[in-house]
Image (tube, rainbow, N blue to C red):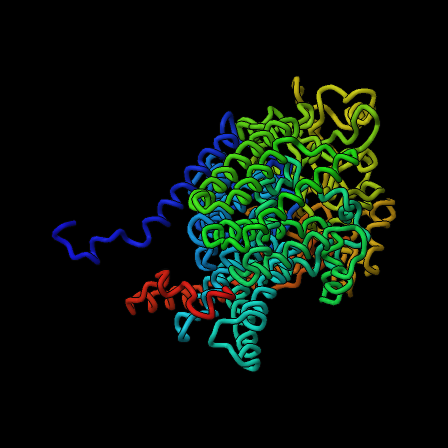
Amino acid sequence: RTLLPKEAARRPRWVPDALALVLLIALTAMSMTTVVRGGTLVDMDTVTQYWPWYAYLGERLRALEIPMWNPYQFSGTPFAADPLSGWGYLPAMLIFTALPMAAAAETYMVVHMLLAGAFAYALGRVLDLGRLGSLAAAVTYEFNGFFYEHNYCCLPYAVVATWLPLALLGLELAIRAHGWLPRAAWWGVSGLAISQILAGWIGQGAYYSLLTIGGYAVYRTVVSPPPALRRIHARILALLLHGPAVLVFGFGLAAASVLPRLEYNAVSNLADGYEGLVGAVFPGWKLRNWSAFLLRDAGYAGGAALALAFAAPLFRWRRHAVPFFAALTVLTVLLSLQQQTLAHRTFSLLPEFERLHDHGRTRITLLTYLGVAFLAGATISNLRRLSGRRSWLCLVPLLAMLVLRAGLSQTDLDIPVETFRAMTLAVLCLVLCAWRPVRRFAPLVLVIVLSVDFHDANRDLVRAHRGTSPHLDLGAYFAPSRAAAYLQSDDSEPFRYVGFAPTIPNGLTIPYSHRWMDPQVIPLEVNADPVVLGLEAVQGYNPVHIARYDDWMQAMNGRRQDYHDAEVFLAALDSPLLHMLNTRYLIVPHKALGKQDDVRLAKERFPLLLEDQRADLLSNPRVLPRAWVVHEARQERAGRALDLLRDGVVDPWRTVLLERQPPTMAPAAEPSADQAEVQVSDPEHLRVRVETTAPGMVVLSEVYYPAWRAYVDGEPAEVYAANHALRAVPVPAGEHIVDLRYESPALRLGIAITLGLGTVVIALWVKVLRQGTDPLDYRTLRPSGAARGVS
């Protein structure tokens, strides 16, 4: 150091920031031990949906294949086009390709915790919160109860929360940038974050995120712009430039996931929204439910964090984008209410907002935690600059806390004493900041208070939810039962199965997804188990289905069910619709569940093939094969075919029902000579050798979807929607090879757009870095002069 010039001997500017990130990593490791100790912490949705799907995604990517079709649930359903499959979401694709399911699941959760904290810290630094203010924002954002719980429970929420700060960061730096090259590079960063949000939750989460990003663009270009945008026309032009630019980059980078999902949505059960679907509308909060922010549970925003957030607008209203984050917090809380407010009426003017928002109004509170985190960080960043004249404002949070406690004492709400303790410590620090010597240490003390408060609250959360969110050995949980092992060994010809135990002792019907821990339901291999086991099932659990298949299940069961589920009930056991799905096996509990008769009746109707102490295996002698040939077709209006088939009016073995003009066919000279043998049965390719004495149609117990294409002896052929939900292909007389391939134009176009624009973004950053400019140099990023007051 004595031999180096004075300038070089100074500590690099990035060292304190690196230390702050190391501290975040240490806090994350400490917090995540609760999640991974004694097994993987799971919840219903991660076991019945996400982890098995992501594992399948990784398995196919390791084989250098694109998982376009999932043959293991719902008798076959789109996979890459499924909005929850993980396709297009980089963390899921990379982590589950590299690691087995259990290790990948734990790594996935840790990575999201770290990314959320790091992105929040970086955004805080750019907004001039200072290192401790940015660290406070990161701790509040990463460890609040909402993010912590949804990171192992309901992954799309965590996806949105993780990437939203990066989207705002890229937009902020693009607005400040001088020159088209760095500006476009930061558009690419914001676009990357938007693309991941779209890949993770293309519905409500993406809509709310785009509203937030759009609102921030309006705030930073029109309401509180940088000094260069002094005139109103310059502000409007900046808004019209930056807003569409980040959207173009975002949707372009997400094209590989968005375009196939738009293709799927058009023929799915959600094509017309959630209206009319069973279990699809979740009402908002009442005023008393706002106490969830104070309860040390899944909605905990932090007692200390809320006290600090409340104080932020009192100190420096125009600094650190405080007006934006304050408005974000207030509006999202108001929009979570059941009651119609002015905020509801205003936002309902936006296209599709009301239809999406009414699906679950409280979901918008995922944005509230972003506002609380940065308001808390803004308060801490201003403590050292607190003047004597403003010190008295620190008393306001104290008075507010006393009024809150007095008000709650008159109700039946039980706010934990730990919450008030954290609030008291935070407010006490603020009040003592009126004494100058305390201001130097108060920010660090408050960061410690925040960290301890959230750590204790999250530990209590995991303990309280142990009954519904246990630690599991995922390998043991998804290990095949004896019945499933038998099915895995049956490689004679393609088949499907159902797990059957539709009622519980009190006679009520509860979906299998809600009984995922029931020891009598686990060996039935329902929900997402077939995806892990590589077995094709009729059932499944997913909010998105092919609409035609939903119609089929409703007709087969004689009843509707929750829009997430597709299950087989007692009425379906006698239905020809079940046999037409190539259902060769049924797995049933070894013992009846209480007083119900469903399992006993199933065992009376189907021969017992395998008996075990956990689950028995039944065979279905009336099952139809995967493919067969017919020589008679009738045209029926949409929906009519299911009634005719269910009631036995039409024999599916002889006649196929089509919704448009049938092709030319002729009676078979020797019907017994007709053959349809499945030679290849891969997820995206089905090959059938057909032999017939007259022109006819080969009918397949495969669900119809527009992306499937047919080839007869290598020549393109038409694929018909047969019997309402299946596929049929016309074949001439003789012996032929019929190939069906999944060829989605939307997926191909999307991949091309994503790869092309991704290459552009990489090239932009290579060019920026080659110019020798450090894009993260805080001397260039920190606002100066008039900009400091509005940043």
Q: What residue occupies the far top of the structure in this picture?
A: 613
Q: Which of the pair 40/245 is nearer the observer?
A: 245
Q: In this orientation, does residue 62 appear? A: no
Q: In this orientation, does residue 464 appear? A: yes
Q: Is residue 445 left or right of residue 681?
A: left
Q: Is residue 229 left or right of residue 299?
A: left
- Position of residue 56 relative to residue 350, above or below, is above
Res 646 quadrant in image: top right
Residue 60, horizontal then vertical, whole percent: 49, 46
Please tell me how many numbered marks the rendered image carries: 0
Image point 80% across, 33% down: which residue? 509
Residue 450, horizontal then vertical, whole percent: 52, 40
Res 354 quadrant in image: bottom right
Image point 63% across, 38% down: which residue? 298
Image point 76% across, 42% down: which residue? 288
Residue 496, horizontal then vertical, whole percent: 66, 38
Residue 520, horizontal then vertical, whole percent: 69, 24
Q: Which of the pair 664/332 is nearer the observer?
A: 332
Q: Which of the pair 789/717 is nearer the observer?
A: 789
Res 247 quadrant in image: bottom right
- Position of residue 379 relative to residue 715, above or below, is above
Image point 20% across, 53% down: which residue? 9
Q: Which of the pair 5/525 is nearer the observer?
A: 5
